[in-house]
Image (tube, rainbow, N blue to C red):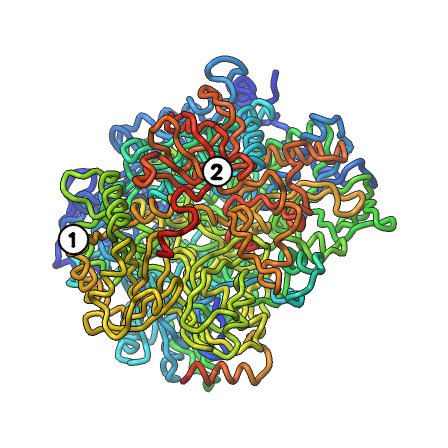
């Protein structure tokens, strides 16, 4: 019998829920491993899981500075989609989507992936053409996409202001039906449990303080819980990439760390049944199963490692929300938080071997990292195991910027805060 | 008389009766009542249903922390969900309904969830619903099927969809001292700072200043504390340098000592006053903040602690003293500290029978024994409540002997009849704002509470916030805080005279009574003590994991009631002291904030509208307008009965046959002056500008530093050191910032001044074979013949008496001129041009015709310069000077930017003579069912009147090499497929003979 | 967050636009050193702590400022004109006032 099922729930309920095992062990770190993954967030944990599951590499430690899942996997707006413009991104995120579609089964852990669709609104004909270009690009790669008329949209989201009198009237939209939301924490916990059950050591409260080196080669790490050696050291630390790379003596990276705020309203009966994005500003919203509206907008726009935001963005996001949903003015914002995003120079990620021998790097997720969690770990595990990228992450090199091979979905150039 | 209203006392206005409606039934209360106090006075005990189990719930508290008694307030069609009844001041006509119940609050079918109690434990959702591996519900489909029903059962209130007609307002304020909280500490702090002449703001989230003074029953300076508070607030009111903000919640502590506050201006009024906003959103920049935010009483965790009739002790005290309401006739108390005894006495005085004081502590001070005696209450020391009885209202409870050290229960359970059970689990300072401002809270063992962290911003704490729970301490604290906030040191203060009951603020370290039955930690989210222990068993032991796994502290009260008890239970399970389990960092907002208030003046008016000087003329003359960023521009000037296509075809045709005029005022315009202006332009543009003659214009291209195309436009040399640059409409701001950056940061030695003049000039482009004749007919002061005004030449003259600048340049491909005049004269000059054009058949044309003519000419716009294309991709490499470096020149030849498979600009002609679509893709092999292998996409398309064909511009792999070849348009989104020919992007008049004339 | 513009005084962050890492040195315009160009365009210092940044007072005097700001606490320890030398700063001020 699977560890988690309706039957096990019932059985345990009858015995007072006394027999549930910890979702993951709390081991002390060993002296050495085949692979160390730095970062116990979504990407680090999924990397460990796929190393064990796909490549049979189980002598693995995931080192987490704080509590597992304390990074962006625990502080995002939970959107999962593969509606990108450029083929390199679309292929990668579609691979992720396919992993998502079977993830709860794969992990024997319900991550509550709910394919309720993601609708990008257009407000001008030029925007509609842009969305059509993107949707067609997706369709030519076998990814689902469809255009919606204003009437379709009004039926799908009755609370949305689709009147012509809106400052930016809705003239249509691009829908990806297979997009959706998932329970963010559950993704971290599900991967942690899956990796743990396959023998991976997940070590919390273990901060990496430096790298062990043999010449250029990375041979392990020093941590607050002692030295740990490893044949391969992989970084999946998102917003902390700059700090950890600095420990390896690399000060300069094509990465800036920016703070992104997110918000949740008080719990409401269902009112928005899809993920919706605004075309005339940066705003996205969905509703959680608990009923809270989960929404966010632009980056605060300056480098920050503080998980705290500033007021101007709060005001901006709320005004964009009400431009779409004037009926929600009396709903109340309950909670806000900030996540530190590793903004890359073209808005696309980096999953690569190097840049030092013995090191593997996974970063540059901007604010799209959550949906990438399965594919990021899957591709990173491949890259670590085989010392070469899979075709899905082959374009996501570190040197692509210098070679002019950027993957710039938004066309904003080397301005990280604009991606 | 309402059943539970005491005969006298309270601060309500008993002469004023207020009528309101709850769940459809009419009730009355008095001015000064909250919805909670008024309903309690009417004998109502059932206020709401819990989130998960739909358990019946009463009112727990008397303030902002209320987790149970949430209602939806209705104002006509407008709904306001999830408002705590304890925070709603009643007014005539107030209409509120209960939430999360069906069909009614009393009979809620959702309560069936209680049957699944043990199964619905923490983590339930993660462990099931994975569904079958095969079939229609495979993958995540089974979960989605179940989720549909789960979602409908979840959620609290229902939001409205009717637009909120209320107005919201924003205010910025600056002060020397912001005092948050107006209990004795806050009042005195505000007074002390005010007396020193400082600018002070005093914010109080409740309607009245005074905080606990309003219900403590104490005597300060020989007057009832409530009167003392009113007098002190009154003294502040008279000062010019003080702003008093009642009903104002300071909810956010941001960087730079910037605080955000919400003032509920008219929520308590039947009809708002004239011009009054509903809410006012304050951004307060304070030199120093005094945090006098008080403390919260903690519930105790024991079986059945959620039954309606179980309430916080101070809340009952408050209902009695402030509202003249008795929450029960036979009241018992259950406590681990002394503060409950004062409540017992207050309720006794208000007329209730106090049946028992159950105290977990085996030894009580003689003072407490005396107080209990005075309340005529039985003392059950060393006892604990182990169960409550009753249905939707409390009828009694059971006690057992309790050993504080071991937590063990012993002896027989004894039943006690009571209709109200008050609990007190000690007090937690309200440190939320201090936590937001940065640091970690510190655990105080004696007080069993987290005390404020060390300041990381400029704030000073006072009173219960500091763990100084006694009124005397609070007043001394407040005075010191108020003085040191303004850098003053007062003379030692005479102790104020305070009559208060005795009491030791240190509670016994007891948080939970372990006995059979559901003991609630988080009331709203139905998180029980067992759930916390299950989280522990499953390894969710860090405080953040506990919170996320069980949802403890995630309800609308944000853990104000549940945080410490939850931590304590986890600490016990771990065998660790509480501080080692940690505390969560508080984040804004302190309590929920209306989204309308945060949007404030932008609610209904999100962004400015940019209108050209001729906007009204366009509207008056039949233009259909089109949004282009923030701008509005004419799309077509349709005649009656015309389709959009018919209109633009007519406009474009007429322009090419005679003449047309279009409003180009939206183009970005930047005045550039200085001795180094020409040199600067050489660095900014890919082509040479220093060689440009005065009185001439040149088309220029800019790259980004990374070598990709950035923007294009013409720049006019008006004098040796005087240029006027034009940019695309969309990039006007970006180009300006780009130029300023280089002048200020990279090349400060260049003497150049740039000024945005976009809004200073109105512009009209007039083109077509008759354009010159039209100008000749209306321009004075200059000739416009070929010699005076050659291609790319500039002249100054007048039209209808207004000075104009005319440059002969063409976007349409016709002989064309751009005419600029001062923005204020735009319509005047435009009308003169239109009038002059009448004999020549001049038409006004909009963006559609403009776009059509530019597609025919193969010119690029933002659709092609999309941030991913190079000059070469767009066949603009002829503009890349090899004689000088320019921004982007060093980077533009990198391997990725010269790769052969890049998308290049081409023209397309539909061979099936059907319209093409923007955003359609192009393929070599047509596969309508499974489109694949796109080789590029259409950037712009139209019906070309000049060619009589449907044409498009496209970015296609291989580009020029494909000229003359065939491919297919593939547009699965719109089901448009068909053959096309790939041609040069220069469809029309490729050698430019028409514009050169 | 408040930034004290040396010309305008303390102003809310909403008036400013961020222009990023202020440590980057642009190669000489004619430089053909591609590594130097790449480093200038794509590489950033991204410290957790004090950071030397360029901001523009775009909603005010439009001067570019060199700001030393802590990326952990958002505290600002210094703000000067990006133009650097006192002369040009003074000139900026004079021009702004005229």
Q: Secondary structure at mark 2?
A: strand
Q: Is residue B6 visible?
A: no
**Marking on residue A79:** 2
Give the answer, above or below, for where B453 lies relative to B163.
below
- Quadrant of the image occupied by residue A382: top right
- Quadrant of the image occupied by residue A22: top right
Q: In which quadrant of the rendered image does the C terminus of chain B lie?
A: bottom left
Labels 2 and 1 positioned on one and the same chain: no
Question: Residue B473, image x and y in percent?
Answer: 46, 71
Q: Image point 53% across, 60% down: which residue?
A: A302
Whether label 2 touches label 1, CB < 8 Å: no
Give the answer, above or below, for where B570 lies relative to B980.
below
Q: Which of the pair B393/A209 is nearer the observer?
A: A209
The residue carrying mark 1 is B621
Chain ID of residue with mark 2? A
Q: Which of the pair B758/A318 is nearer the observer?
A: B758
Question: Residue C17, image x and y in percent?
Answer: 48, 64
Could you tell me how far apart the alpha carbons at marks 2 and 1 are, in whole angstroms? 46 Å
Give the number of callouts. Answer: 2
Question: Residue C4, image x and y in percent?
Answer: 49, 75
């Amino acid at each position: 019998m699977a560890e988690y099922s309706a039957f096990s729930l019932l059985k345990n309920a009858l015995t007072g829920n006394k027999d549930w095992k910890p979702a993951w062990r709390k081991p002390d770190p060993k002296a050495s491993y085949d692979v160390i993954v730095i970062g116990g967030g979504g990407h680090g944990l999924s990397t460990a899981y796929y190393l064990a599951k796909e490549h049979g590499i189980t002598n693995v430690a995931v080192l987490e500075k704080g509590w597992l899942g304390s990074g962006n996997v625990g502080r995002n707006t939970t959107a999962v989609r593969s509606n990108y413009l450029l083929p390199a991104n679309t292929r990668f995120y579609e691979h992720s989507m396919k992993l998502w579609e079977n993830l709860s089964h794969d992990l024997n852990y319900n991550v509550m992936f709910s394919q309720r669709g993601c609708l990008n609104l257009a407000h001008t004909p030029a925007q509609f053409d842009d969305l059509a270009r993107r949707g067609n690009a997706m369709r030519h790669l076998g990814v689902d996409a469809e255009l919606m008329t204003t009437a379709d949209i009004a039926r799908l989201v009755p609370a949305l202001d689709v009147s012509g009198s809106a400052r930016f009237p809705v003239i249509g939209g691009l829908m990806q039906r297979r997009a959706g939301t998932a329970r963010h924490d559950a993704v971290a916990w599900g991967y942690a449990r899956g990796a743990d059950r396959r023998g991976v050591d997940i070590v919390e409260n273990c901060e990496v303080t430096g790298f062990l080196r043999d010449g250029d080669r990375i041979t392990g790490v020093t941590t607050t819980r002692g030295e740990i050696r490893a044949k391969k050291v992989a970084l999946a630390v998102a917003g902390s990439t700059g700090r950890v790379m600095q420990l390896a003596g690399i000060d300069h990276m094509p990465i800036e760390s920016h703070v992104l705020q997110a918000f949740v309203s008080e719990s409401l009966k269902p009112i928005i049944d899809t993920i919706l994005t605004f075309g005339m500003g940066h705003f996205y919203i969905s509703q959680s199963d608990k009923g809270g509206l989960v929404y966010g907008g632009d980056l605060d726009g300056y480098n920050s490692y503080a998980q705290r935001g500033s007021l101007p963005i709060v005001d901006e996001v709320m005004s964009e929300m009400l431009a779409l949903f004037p009926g929600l003015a009396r709903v109340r914002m309950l909670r806000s938080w900030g996540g530190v995003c590793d903004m890359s120079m073209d808005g696309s990620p980096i999953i690569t071997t190097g840049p030092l021998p013995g090191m593997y790097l996974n970063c540059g997720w901007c604010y799209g990292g959550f949906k990438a969690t399965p594919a990021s770990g899957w591709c990173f595990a491949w890259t670590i195991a085989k010392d070469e990228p899979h075709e899905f992450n082959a374009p996501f090199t570190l040197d692509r910027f210098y070679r002019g091979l950027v993957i710039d979905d938004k066309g904003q150039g080397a301005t990280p805060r604009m991606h | 008389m309402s059943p539970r209203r005491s005969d006298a006392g309270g601060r309500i206005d008993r002469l004023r009766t207020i009528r309101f409606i709850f769940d459809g039934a009419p009730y009355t209360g008095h001015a000064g009542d909250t919805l909670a106090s008024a309903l309690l006075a009417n004998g109502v005990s059932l206020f709401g249903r819990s989130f998960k189990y739909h358990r019946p719930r009463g009112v727990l508290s008397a303030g902002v922390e209320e987790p149970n008694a949430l209602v939806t307030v209705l104002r006509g069609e407008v709904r306001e969900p999830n408002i705590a009844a304890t925070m709603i001041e009643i007014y005539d006509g107030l209409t509120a309904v209960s939430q999360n119940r069906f069909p009614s609050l009393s009979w809620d079918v959702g309560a069936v969830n209680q049957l699944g109690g043990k199964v619905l434990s923490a983590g339930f959702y993660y462990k099931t619903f994975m569904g079958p591996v095969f079939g229609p519900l495979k993958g995540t489909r089974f979960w989605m099927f179940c989720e549909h029903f789960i979602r409908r059962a979840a959620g609290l209130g229902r939001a409205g969809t009717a637009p909120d007609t209320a107005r919201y307002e924003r205010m910025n304020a600056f002060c020397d001292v912001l005092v948050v909280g107006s209990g004795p500490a806050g009042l005195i702090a505000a007074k002390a700072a005010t007396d020193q002449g400082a600018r002070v703001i005093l914010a109080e989230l409740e309607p009245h200043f005074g905080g606990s003074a309003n219900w403590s029953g104490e005597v300060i300076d020989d007057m009832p504390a409530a009167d003392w508070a009113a007098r002190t607030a009154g003294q502040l009111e008279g000062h010019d340098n003080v702003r008093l903000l009642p009903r104002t919640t300071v909810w956010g502590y941001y960087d730079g000592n910037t605080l955000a506050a919400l003032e509920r201006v008219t929520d308590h009024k039947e009809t708002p006053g004239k011009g009054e906003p509903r809410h006012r959103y304050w951004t307060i920049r304070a030199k120093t903040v005094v945090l006098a935010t008080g403390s919260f009483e903690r519930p105790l965790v024991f079986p059945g602690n959620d039954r309606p009739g179980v309430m916080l002790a101070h809340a009952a005290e408050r209902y009695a003293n402030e509202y003249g309401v008795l929450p029960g006739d036979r009241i018992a108390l259950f406590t681990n500290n002394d503060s409950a005894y004062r409540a017992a006495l207050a309720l006794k005085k208000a007329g209730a029978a106090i049946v028992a004081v159950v105290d977990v502590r085996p030894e009580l001070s003689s003072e407490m024994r005396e107080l209990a005696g005075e309340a005529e209450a039985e003392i059950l020391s060393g006892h604990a409540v182990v169960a409550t009885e009753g249905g939707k209202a409390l009828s009694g409870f059971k006690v057992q002997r309790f050993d504080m050290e071991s937590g063990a229960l012993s002896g027989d359970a004894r039943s006690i009849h009571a209709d109200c059970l008050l609990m007190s689990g000690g007090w937690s300072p309200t440190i939320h704002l201090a936590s937001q401002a940065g640091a970690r809270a510190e655990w105080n063992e004696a007080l069993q509470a987290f005390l404020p962290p060390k300041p990381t911003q400029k704030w000073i704490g006072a009173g219960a916030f500091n763990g100084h729970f006694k009124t005397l301490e609070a007043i001394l604290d407040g005075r010191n805080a108020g003085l040191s906030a303004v850098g003053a040191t007062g003379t030692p203060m005479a102790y104020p005279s305070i009559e208060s009951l005795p009491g030791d603020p240190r509670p016994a370290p007891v948080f939970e009574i372990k006995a059979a039955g559901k003991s609630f930690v988080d009331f709203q989210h139905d998180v029980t003590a067992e759930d916390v222990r299950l989280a522990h068993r499953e390894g969710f032991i860090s405080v953040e994991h506990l919170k996320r796994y069980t949802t403890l502290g995630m309800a609308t009260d944000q853990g104000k009631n549940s945080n410490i008890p939850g931590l304590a239970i986890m600490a016990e399970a771990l065998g660790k002291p509480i501080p080692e389990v940690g505390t969560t960092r508080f984040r804004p907002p302190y309590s929920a904030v209306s989204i309308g208030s945060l949007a404030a003046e932008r609610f209904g008016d999100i962004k400015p509208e940019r209108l050209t000087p001729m906007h009204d003329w366009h509207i008056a003359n039949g233009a259909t307008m089109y949004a282009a960023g923030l701008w509005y521009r004419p799309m077509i000037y349709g005649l009656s009965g015309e389709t959009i296509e018919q209109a633009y075809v007519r406009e474009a045709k007429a322009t090419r046959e005679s003449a047309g005029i279009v409003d180009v005022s939206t183009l970005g315009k930047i005045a550039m002056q200085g001795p180094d202006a020409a040199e600067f332009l050489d660095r900014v543009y890919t082509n040479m500008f220093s060689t440009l003659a005065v009185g001439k214009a040149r088309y220029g291209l800019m790259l980004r530093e990374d070598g990709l195309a950035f923007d294009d436009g013409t720049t006019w040399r008006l004098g040796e050191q005087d240029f006027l640059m034009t940019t695309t409409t969309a990039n006007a701001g970006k180009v300006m910032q780009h130029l300023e950056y280089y002048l200020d940061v990279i090349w400060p030695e260049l003497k150049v001044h740039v000024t945005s003049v976009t809004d200073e000039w109105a512009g009209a482009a007039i083109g077509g074979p008759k354009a010159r004749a039209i100008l000749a007919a209306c321009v004075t002061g200059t000739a416009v013949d070929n010699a005076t005004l050659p291609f790319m030449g500039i002249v100054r003259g007048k039209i209808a008496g207004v000075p104009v600048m005319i440059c002969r340049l063409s976007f349409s491909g016709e002989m064309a001129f751009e005419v600029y005049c001062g923005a204020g004269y735009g319509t005047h000059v435009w009308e003169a041009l239109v009038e002059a054009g009448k004999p020549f058949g001049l038409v006004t044309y909009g963006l559609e015709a403009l776009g059509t003519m530019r597609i025919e000419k193969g010119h690029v716009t933002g659709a092609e310069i999309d941030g991913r294309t190079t000059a070469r991709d767009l066949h603009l490499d002829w503009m890349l000077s090899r004689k000088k470096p320019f921004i982007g020149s060093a980077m533009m030849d990198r391997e990725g930017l010269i790769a052969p498979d890049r998308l290049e600009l081409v023209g397309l002609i539909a061979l099936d003579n059907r319209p093409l679509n923007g955003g359609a893709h192009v393929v070599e092999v047509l596969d309508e069912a499974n489109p694949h292998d796109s080789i590029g996409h259409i950037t712009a398309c139209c019906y070309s009147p000049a060619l009589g064909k449907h044409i498009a511009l496209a970015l296609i792999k291989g580009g020029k090499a494909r000229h003359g070849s065939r491919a297919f348009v593939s547009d699965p989104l719109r089901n448009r497929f068909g053959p096309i020919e790939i041609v040069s992007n220069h469809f029309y008049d490729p050698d430019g003979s028409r514009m050169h004339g | 967050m408040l930034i004290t513009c040396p010309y305008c005084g303390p102003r809310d962050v909403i008036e400013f636009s961020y222009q990023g890492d202020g440590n980057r040195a642009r190669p000489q315009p004619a430089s053909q050193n591609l590594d130097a160009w790449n480093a200038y365009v794509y590489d950033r210092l991204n410290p957790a702590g004090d950071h030397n940044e360029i901001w523009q007072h775009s909603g005010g005097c439009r001067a570019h400022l060199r700001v030393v700001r802590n990326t952990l606490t958002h505290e600002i320890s210094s703000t000067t004109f990006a133009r650097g030398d006192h002369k040009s700063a003074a000139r900026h001020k004079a021009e702004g006032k005229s």
